Image (cartoon, rainbow, N blue to C red):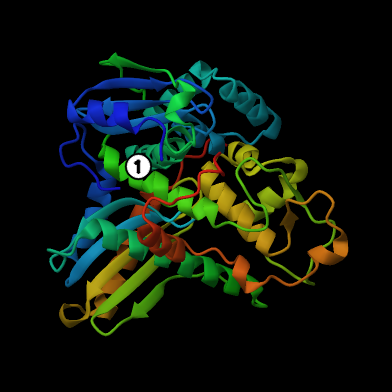
């Protein structure tokens, strides 16, 4: 679902995600619920003009949710307990970066970042995403009163 | 297609603000702000108050009592408690994310139901009425309906008999020697006693009904739970055939191909 820029109160979710706008070559970044492939919010980057973010964003979110499901199954089937940190998908012209936020939302969220390979430094983008992930995670983890 | 889009689309075109009450079997409430959807509430799916409160309940019995009340439509105590939580310990980001999760889940139950127009669904619009949880973001009606249709397509592609309102139970014996489950999967398996449905499990966990139904399907694929009450142990132990794999991507591609041929039979 696309968000409305005319909403009354400040959209804090969108603002948090917009921190990823600093990544060079960013096409789009979405906050996705991997259990439902529901796109909660999207920001469009400097390389993201004229790309029809809604339909494309949904396809990427669906694919990324599938990828996470498969990789969770794989890590669950391996001998040693381990956690998925991120996924890098390299296409000819693009990178897709997927980073799980296991404690965010009702039951974990993922950030899906699409980058223009020609205009991005993948290593740097990954560092930037990682730096932002804990911020998003802290902000989005449900408050626990124990 | 959805039962009430006409009235809803009319109100959207009028840029109306208020609450559209959709009575009837799959009833719910759509809160509009300037013709856009601010929130959707359904008595069938956990609302934002349930999602907010769930992590604060360590006590399963206390939670079960609260859920029983909520499912009867007694929302006032939960709304008061959730309001206090928003003012004290939960950030605006958390609240807004859970609000969007609850909105989409309720939209499927409310706008995705296969109730024919002929069933005399009563709708009533109360201008100016707002939901208690402030909308930091609103959504265009066609976008919400598109998400509802996407979810219907996914539900229609689930196999092994998994559906939001069909009971599941743990298999008595695991089909493989070793399996590692996530906390959510364990909680589902633990509570799947043959009388609980994915819809019940969603309330129990404080998750979305749609997401929980997909998670139950995943567990059925793994052979951990089954929808068949009479399934003998040996047949549960068979390996998972690839055709039972559910892919959001495949569903999404199939949906755009079939356009509006989404199945109408499996609704929460």
Q: Is B128 placed left or right of B132 in the picture? A: left
Q: Is residue B90 above or below residue B169?
A: above
* Rendering coords of residue B245 (x, y %): 58, 67
Q: Quadrant of residue B219?
A: bottom right
Q: Is B38 placed left or right of A24 in the picture? A: right
User: Could you tell me which secondary element the residue under label 1 belongs to?
Assistant: helix
What residue lies at 85% left-to-right and 51% top-to-bottom? B230
Q: Nearer the viewer, residue B262 or A98?
A: B262
* Rendering coords of residue B86 (x, y %): 39, 30
Task: Count every numbered label the image shows and give the total.
Answer: 1
Q: Is residue B188 above or below residue B35?
A: below
Chain label for disc 1: B
Q: Looking at the rendering, in which quadrant would you find the N terminus of chain B? A: top left
What residue lies at 48% left-to-right and 45% top-to-bottom? A106
The residue at which mark 1 appears reads as: B145
Please say whether residue B17 is visible from this viewpoint.
yes
Q: Looking at the rendering, in which quadrant would you find the C terminus of chain B? A: top right
Q: Is B268 placed left or right of A54 in the picture? A: right
Q: Is B177 placed left or right of B116 in the picture? A: right
* Rendering coords of residue B45 (x, y %): 52, 34
Q: Nearer the viewer, residue A113 or A85?
A: A113
Q: Nearer the viewer, residue A18 or B43?
A: B43
């Amino acid at each position: 679902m696309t968000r409305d820029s005319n909403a009354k109160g400040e959209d804090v979710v969108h603002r948090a995600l917009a921190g990823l706008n600093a990544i060079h070559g960013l096409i789009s970044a979405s906050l996705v619920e991997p259990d439902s492939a529901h796109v909660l919010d999207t920001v469009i980057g400097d390389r993201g003009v004229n790309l029809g973010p809604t339909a494309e964003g949904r396809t990427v979110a669906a694919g990324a949710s599938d990828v996470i499901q498969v990789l969770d199954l794989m890590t669950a089937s391996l001998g040693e307990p381990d956690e998925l940190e991120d996924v890098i998908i390299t296409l000819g012209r693009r990178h897709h970066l997927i980073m799980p936020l296991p404690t965010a939302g009702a039951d974990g969220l993922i950030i899906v970042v699409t980058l223009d390979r020609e205009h991005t430094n993948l290593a740097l983008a990954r560092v930037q995403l990682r730096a932002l992930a804990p911020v998003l995670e802290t902000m989005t983890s449900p408050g626990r009163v124990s | 297609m959805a039962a009430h889009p006409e009235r809803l689309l009319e109100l959207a075109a009028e840029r109306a603000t208020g609450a559209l009450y959709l009575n009837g079997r799959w009833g719910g409430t759509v809160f509009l702000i300037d013709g856009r959807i601010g929130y959707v509430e359904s008595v069938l799916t956990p609302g934002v108050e349930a999602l907010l409160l769930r992590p604060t309940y360590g006590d399963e019995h206390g939670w079960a009592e609260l859920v029983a009340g909520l499912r009867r439509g007694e929302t006032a105590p939960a709304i008061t408690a959730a309001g206090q939580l928003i003012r004290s310990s939960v950030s605006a980001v958390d609240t807004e994310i859970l609000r969007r999760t609850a909105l989409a889940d309720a939209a499927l139950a409310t706008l995705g139901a296969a109730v024919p127009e002929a069933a005399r669904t009563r709708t009533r619009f109360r201008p100016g009425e707002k939901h208690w949880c402030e909308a930091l973001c609103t959504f265009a009606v066609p976008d919400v309906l598109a998400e509802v249709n996407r979810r219907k397509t996914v539900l229609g592609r689930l196999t092994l008999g998994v559906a939001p309102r069909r009971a599941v139970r743990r298999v008595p014996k695991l089909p493989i020697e070793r399996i590692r489950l996530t906390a959510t999967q364990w909680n589902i398996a633990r509570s799947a006693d043959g009388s609980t449905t994915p819809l019940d499990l969603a309330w129990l966990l404080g998750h979305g009904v749609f997401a929980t139904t997909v998670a139950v399907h995943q567990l059925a694929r793994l052979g951990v739970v089954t929808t068949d009450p009479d399934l003998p142990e040996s047949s549960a132990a068979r390996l998972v055939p690839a055709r039972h794999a559910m892919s959001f991507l495949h569903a999404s591609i199939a949906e755009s191909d079939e356009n509006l041929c989404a199945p109408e039979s499996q609704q929460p």
